[in-house]
Image: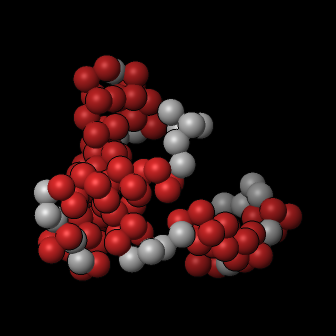
Amino acid sequence: MDNKTTIEELKEKIRQFCELRDWDQYHNAKELTIGIVTEASELLEHFRFKSEDQVDAMFQNKSKRQELTEEIADTLYFLIRLAQRYNVDLSTELENKMKKNGERYPVERVKGSNKKYSEY
């Protein structure tokens, strides 16, 4: 479905879902950002102290994969809701950020490098 659904469609689906429940009153920038961090932390819990092989195995296990994808979806929900509520064009902002990152981390300088992130 990723190749058939636009971000705008996701925003609209979430907007309708929340408006039917009268949740706008609870979904200010602070609360939505707390939701993003909380859900991302719940996702992180699954990976903490796991090797790359263990993580790969979790994605191969049907029930564990379901847990992981639900946390990913929860995080995405709050992020899209924040963008929807505050009229942030995620595609444009991601494009702008990728351009900045491309300038900051040019391929010829960073590809294959094991330097610490802060050294760039």
Say whether residue 95 is left or right of residue 13: right
Q: Where is residue 11 in the image (x, y as percent from the top left)?
A: 41, 57
Q: Where is residue 113 in the image (x, y as percent from the top left)?
A: 72, 61
Residue 34 visible in the current orientation:
no
In the displayed structure, 28 sits above or below 62; it is: below
Say whether residue 19 is left or right of residue 40: left
Give the camera-side residue of 94 and 88. 88
Residue 28 visible in the current orientation:
yes
Q: Where is the C terminus found, in terms of image quarters?
A: bottom right
Which quadrant would residue 60 be assigned to in this image? top left
For image coordinates 46% across by 50% down, the residue present is: 9
In the displayed structure, 35 sits above or below 10; it is: below
- Indicate the colouring scheme: secondary structure
For image coordinates 33% across by 29% down, the residue present is: 65
Which quadrant would residue 27 be assigned to in this image? bottom left
For image coordinates 52% across by 42% down, the residue present is: 5
Give the camera-side residue of 45 and 38. 38
In the displayed structure, 20 sits above or below 96; it is: above
Say whether residue 101 is left or right of residue 63: right
For image coordinates 33% across by 21% down, the residue present is: 61
